[in-house]
Image (cartoon, rainbow, N blue to C red):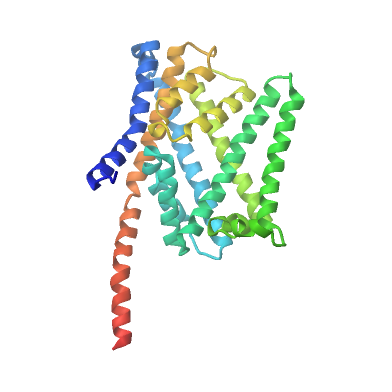
Amino acid sequence: MTRTPATRRAIRVLRGLVPFGVSAALLVYLFRRIDAGEALARTTPDVLLRFLAPVVLWNFVTLAIEARCLHRVAAAHDRSLPLVVAARIKAACYLLSIVYYPLGSAGLSVLLGRRARVPLAEAIGMVFLITLFDLGSVTSLAAIGATFLRADALGVRIGLLVALVAAIIAGFAFLKAPFPLGPLEALRRLPILRAPRQAGPLLLLELGVLRALFVGTYVALTHALLGAYGLEVEPTRLALNVAIMLAVSALPIAAGGLGTGQLVFVALFAGVAPDEVLLSASLLLSASLVSTRAILGLAFAREFTREALAAAREPALRTDASGGHSA
């Protein structure tokens, strides 16, 4: 049965509302299990003041890292993308990422393609390359944290870490092989894989360091959050928990990680403090990240407007140029 345009629009709207429904349902569940009033009361003015400086600093540091990564990936394709421009287009996508993380990546690919003047498929590949290092950094952090957290099955965890590193190396070896790969050659030559395929060793090393630092900033921010409540967690457990939190927050099932973030935070740090304190800390973390990222997104939302106007003018410019040429 053919769907009418109205039906298709309704389905799209419902799909867009699903993450908000999931967030609301999870928060209702937590507020029924944990005293919400007591949790909110734990977020005192002193806690807010102690956490304000770290979260502001975190936003500037992470945006600088993101801008540097975009700048370097574009330069590897012989494209000019100034650091300031890279920071602006990344900040412009924060609002989209809050609503739906893949939507933020899609928006970044569009802006990157237009600002660096590369085809959209190649821009997607550039963003994909950075995402690969994020995935590798989070997984490595989780594996390392689990390795040192408990002594039992140490050999198994080290083996998993080695297997992860080997898989990453094998993937880049596949993309960079100096000989044809038969039926797989068409896959390797896809435009979306051009950025990983053409990335040199120095770029890969720099991206690895930058994305490791990026993930490390989340560990530092969580440490500052717990410190604002007067709590301490051993570094290995903290690193492992943050890695799990990042992996869960990246799942496109809740709006801005709300609900899922609170559920995972309370479960991972159980025993460190009463559930009311942990729920308070997780709500403060989510609210701080969402609000600061939303402010940055709104401040630079004009980047999308500028590109939309430029795209609208291009057909007219091409028409004028062809008309002048024929005359």
**Residue 248 drawn at (x, y percent):** 50, 30
**Residue 40 drawn at (x, y percent):** 36, 17
Residue 63 falls left or right of residue 209: left
In the rendered image, the vertical position of residue 169 relative to residue 246, given as above or below: below
Question: Camera-side residue: 10 or 154?
Answer: 10
**Residue 211 drawn at (x, y percent):** 58, 43
Residue lying at 71% horizontally and 28% vertically, measured from the top left: 157
Residue lying at 50% horizontally and 51% vertically, measured from the top left: 67
Residue lying at 34% horizontally and 54% vertically, measured from the top left: 304
Residue lying at 65% horizontally and 57% vertically, measured from the top left: 183
Residue 251 falls left or right of residue 207: left
Residue 93 falls left or right of residue 201: left
**Residue 32 drawn at (x, y percent):** 36, 12
Question: Camera-side residue: 216 or 199?
Answer: 199
Residue 55 appears in view: yes
Question: Camera-side residue: 58 or 168?
Answer: 168
Kindly give the residue lying farthest to the left in the view shown. Answer: 6
Question: Camera-side residue: 77 or 29?
Answer: 29
Kindly give the residue lying farthest to the front in the view shown. Answer: 1
